[in-house]
Image (cartoon, rainbow, N blue to C red):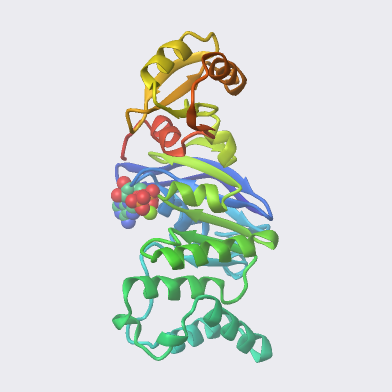
Amino acid sequence: MIEVEQLSKRFGERLAVDALSFTVGPGEVLGFLGPNGAGKSTTMKMITGFIRPSAGTARINGYDIQAAPLAAKREMGYLPEGAPGYGDMSVRQFLDFIADIRAMSGAWRKERMDEVIQEIHLEQVLDQKIDTLSKGFRRRVGVAQAILHDPRVLIMDEPTDGLDPNQKHEVRNLIHGMAKDKIIVISTHILEEVEAVCSRAIVIARGHLLADGTPEELMARSRYHGAVTLDLDNAREAADLLGQLPEVAAVEDGDTDTEITVLPREGQALMAAIGRVIDQQRWTVRELYQQKGRLDEVFRDITGGAAA
Ligand SMILES: Nc1ncnc2c1ncn2[C@@H]1O[C@H](COP(=O)(O)OP(=O)(O)OP(=O)(O)O)[C@@H](O)[C@H]1O
Ligand SMILES: [Mg+2]
């Protein structure tokens, strides 16, 4: 369990994190969303004991990060923003160093080393100096050091940032696979990632918590939630006619001349009503689908389109 209690951080005049409170339980993958400068990294740095809070605290599996920092840190793996590592060390030396400071030993140490190197596909760069790695590989080494001691709590600041599409996919799979018995918090700017791996999302801006819910709950706040998109030849005529249905709030033009999107009034279902009109008018519809909602639109809405 992660318990974040009234966590605040002040940098001079600027209140970067403002009395943030939330808890995360086992099996949850929490996505941290927010515009640049929202306070995501600062919050993660406080939870992991990297910087001191100005007020409030966090407890990791019962251990207060300020009163019992060592015990709390033992519970956690942390992938910081960017890709910190010791540039002079080879990947192998660096992971060995991490295993040392995590006091890993014996067969388990070797087993974890082998597993992680294989999972993150580091074989080909094991003897390369970290300084000479490409950005993506440096990031992968960061992920490797975070999960090496198989922690019960994982805090990862933009884990897929800078990775190629294959690796993004693999790291998401890895997170997915670890989710069952761990508590995972990730920050990301990639909204599809939230849909793909997170069971819950928190949106923050200017250090404030603005929304907290499952990706589906957030998506339900979109004006496109339950909207129906059609592709047909007489799109203009269809738009006029469908716009008159009592269930319909608005009709928007699509990307092409033959595409329209019909938006529902709050709480109204559209598919059946639209289906009836299609039947009556004998339209030939090439495509017809209902939308779940658009997370990017909800995100803009919640955060007011604002940076810090
Ligand atoms: N050491 C510091 N000294 C002064 N201000 C800081 C420091 N660290 C962060 N800040 C400020 O705190 C605010 C929050 O920064 P933070 O890095 O937590 O944002 P973020 O949500 O992680 O943004 P991004 O999406 O760009 O990574 C910003 O205004 C930032 O400039
Ligand atoms: Mg950040």
Q: Where is residue 213 in the image (x, y as percent from the top left)?
A: 58, 38
> In which quarter of the view is residue 118 placed?
bottom right
Seen from the viewer's position, the closer of residues 12 and 32 is 32
Q: Is residue 155 positioned above or below 89 on the image? A: above
Q: Which residue is drawn at 61% across and 55% down?
A: 59
Q: Is residue 115 left or right of residue 194?
A: right
Seen from the viewer's position, the closer of residues 267 and 281 is 281
Q: Residue at x 37, y 87 (%)?
A: 89
Quadrant (top left, top right, bottom left, bottom right) of the N terminus: bottom right
Q: Position of residue 95 (x, y in %)?
A: 49, 83
Q: Residue at x 36, y 43 (%)?
A: 35
> In which quarter of the view is residue 106 placed?
bottom right
Q: Where is residue 62 in the image (x, y as percent from the top left)?
A: 68, 57
The total of numbered circles placed on residues is 0
Quadrant (top left, top right, bottom left, bottom right) of the C terminus: top left
Seen from the viewer's position, the closer of residues 143 and 23 is 143
> In which quarter of the view is residue 266 placed?
top right
Mark yes or no: residue 103 visible.
no
Q: In this view, does 9 lie to the left or right of 28?
A: left
Mark yes or no: residue 126 visible.
yes
Q: Is residue 267 positioned above or below 297 on the image? A: above
